[in-house]
Amino acid sequence: MTDTEHLASSPAPQSTRPQHTLPAATPANGTLPPGPGPLPTGRNAARASRSGRVQRLTVPRLTLPRLELAVLLLATGALYLWNLGASGWANAFYSAAAQAGSQDWTAWFFGSSDAANAITVDKPPASLWVMGLSVRLFGLSSWSILVPQALMGVATVWLVYIAVRRAAAPATADAGLAHRAGLLAGGVMALTPVAVLMFRFNNPDALLVLLMTAAAYAVLRSIQDATAAKAALRWLLLAGVFLGFGFLAKQLQVLLVVPGFAVAYLVAGPAGPAKRLLHLLAAGAALAVSAGWWLAAVELIPADSRPYIGGSQNNSILELTLGYNGLGRLNGAETGSVGGGNGWGTPGLFRLFNSEFGGQVAWLLPSALLLGAGLLWLGRRAPRTDAVRASVIVWGAWVVVTGLTFSLMAGIIHPYYMVALAPGIAGLAGLGGILLWQRRARPVAAAVLAGALLAAGLLASELLGRTAAFLPWLRWVVLLGAIAAGVLVLAGAAVPRLAAPGILTRTTAALAVAAALAGPLAYSLATAATAHSGAIVSAGPAAAGRGGPGMPPAFAGQGNTTGNTNGNANATGSVRGPGAGGGGMGGLLGASTPSSAVVTALKTNAGKYTWAAAVVGSNNAAGYQLATELPVMAVGGFNGTDPAPTLEEFQQFVAEGRIHYFIAGRMMQGGTGSDSAARIGAWVQANFTAQTVGGTTMYEL
């Protein structure tokens, strides 16, 4: 079996026209040889026809690969867009901020929760910029908020495809195999259950993953364009810019991919070691500038001229960056958090495989790492600038560093964070699966492939078994299929004639792909068929006893993973503020759904007030704001633990007639940080008369 054979599971179409394949000596950057050039059009076409230079229309080469890529992207778009509106506002916390940004440019720039700019969300605003512009252009609806997220998912799948295809091209010396490597990687990315969830949702993770994937592609291009150091530097600077804007989506999490990017360029980049190091320093500067300009603006603008920085205790974006969204995520010391202790689960090396996280992303995690290790072993004698080795370093370090961080961090962590692992797993699976398949006649390659298939089958069987009522037969079919495919791969290495192109080889390839992707596909379809709303969501079918994954025990029952648009009316716990048991709707993790009577009351004479109402907690505020499209103050920010506003500031707002109502809402115990919200609630209760409007306790201020 030669290293230039086509993937037997997808034979090239029979045609009398010459097939487009890469020559044996492929350019170092893996680019395809130039085609025949564009056809003349317009007057040029007429003149060419008269001169006899154009005798007939010709079909562009690689039509089938282009069609297959189009099918992949269209299918991904259909999966991510189907019945998208069923999720309503999805995470109302971010939807309300997008609505605010569509009404006020200051709110858009800072990422304020309301158009009157009381407080920001607890993240930088990059993802809100996209949603806010969409709402400004198309009006407020779940579709205008969620469609941009779905399109980000399609773009991410495309970037994974082209990154893997380019790396595989010189290694396979076969355009068809390189294309199939990209297709496999793109398919794995598209069908990762947590990716289906987050590209149908409006958390910042969608933009974060898109920008990290774009940065990975740019880094790999900088290495593959090894013949031109200036071109390499341009791509590396672009990677820094992508990472910088990724920082503005979710802050320090974007840096988890940087070690792998840096090592890959130091190992395989063009020019000498000193110049490679200088290039990396320049890329680091690009990252710092593209992230730092917004941080500098926030720090330099006087505090009384901008909204309070949500998630911080001192109205500081640097505190938010380094504390609540930074080191606090690692060591659990997050002032303003509501978990504490082991409230977010016990860290450990196998956390990603437990009942909360496993079904989100772990399906091919061991297999991908095994395939990457196999590629490194088989390519150990390749040139320094080898594109495959560089790709394995980029994708592999992405998975290892991010996976270990998620496994061992003691602070806030949710199942949907796992989407950050998906591109790395997809890159390793696509590249390793096809390149090792091409070399399956070699015992080492065959053994690695068989081991990866067995690992995928065993893990899928275990994960599917955790949702026993969901397709109970599938776990056994997947396991048997993976074992059978692995045995056939080993048999082909032992008996070469069994690996010759033919029906057996095609069957083996099809069985291997089906066994690897059947479990993720089933979970992905279940995810797309389920409406998701609230602050904490998870992918896949409902698992008995799973409840709200990624939540501290104090919030059991608040997880909203099935699209309950009534929010948290039945949440347990104590009330922060007045109105215990008084019909307050919403809570820490789910938004309120106000009655028509409440909406009418808030809209009455709303033009006289800066805020139609104030309520403790951002999710409580979000429901009222989205229902009325009026500013609603989120007292205490997301957790109700930010000192914004203070009691004195709130009293001043009331004295100036800027707040119409205070709405009683349910909040949870266990938080750390300011008690301003509790003091404000007690003051309102002591000085104003409660009234019940549509089942909700309200105080007219």
Image: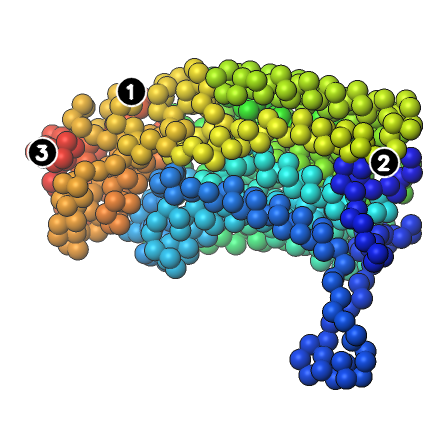
Q: Residue at x 71, y 47 (%)?
A: 163
Amino acid, disc 2: Pro
The residue to which callout 1 is attached is 572
CB atoms of marks 2 and 3 within 8 Å:
no
Q: Secondary structure at mark 2?
A: loop
Quadrant the C terminus occupies: top left
Residue 150 placement (x, y as % from top left): 50, 46
What mark, if any, has residue 501 been given in the picture?
Answer: 2
Task: Residue at 59%, 26% (x, y): give it.
Answer: 519
The mark that comes first in sequence, 1 or 2, is: 2
Q: Nearer the viewer, mark 2 or mark 3?
A: 2
Crowdedness near tag 1: few (<14), some (14–19) or many (≥20) residues, C-alpha within 10 Å: some
Give the alpha-carbon distance from disc 2 to disc 3, as whole Å: 78 Å
| Relative to 363, residue 219 above or below | below
Q: Secondary structure at mark 1?
A: loop
- Residue 691: numbered disc: 3
Percent coordinates x, y for residue 170 in the rendering: 84, 47
Q: Which residue appears at 25% of the width and 36% of the height?
A: 593
Task: State how far apart marks 1 and 3 are (Cα).
Answer: 23 Å
Q: Position of residue 161 (x, y in %)?
A: 68, 46
**In-image side of 484 versus 174 (left or right):** left
The picture places residue 561, in percent across and down from the top left corner, at: 41, 28
- Left or right of residue 194, residue 92 in this image: left
From what the image shows, is residue 62 above or below residue 322? below
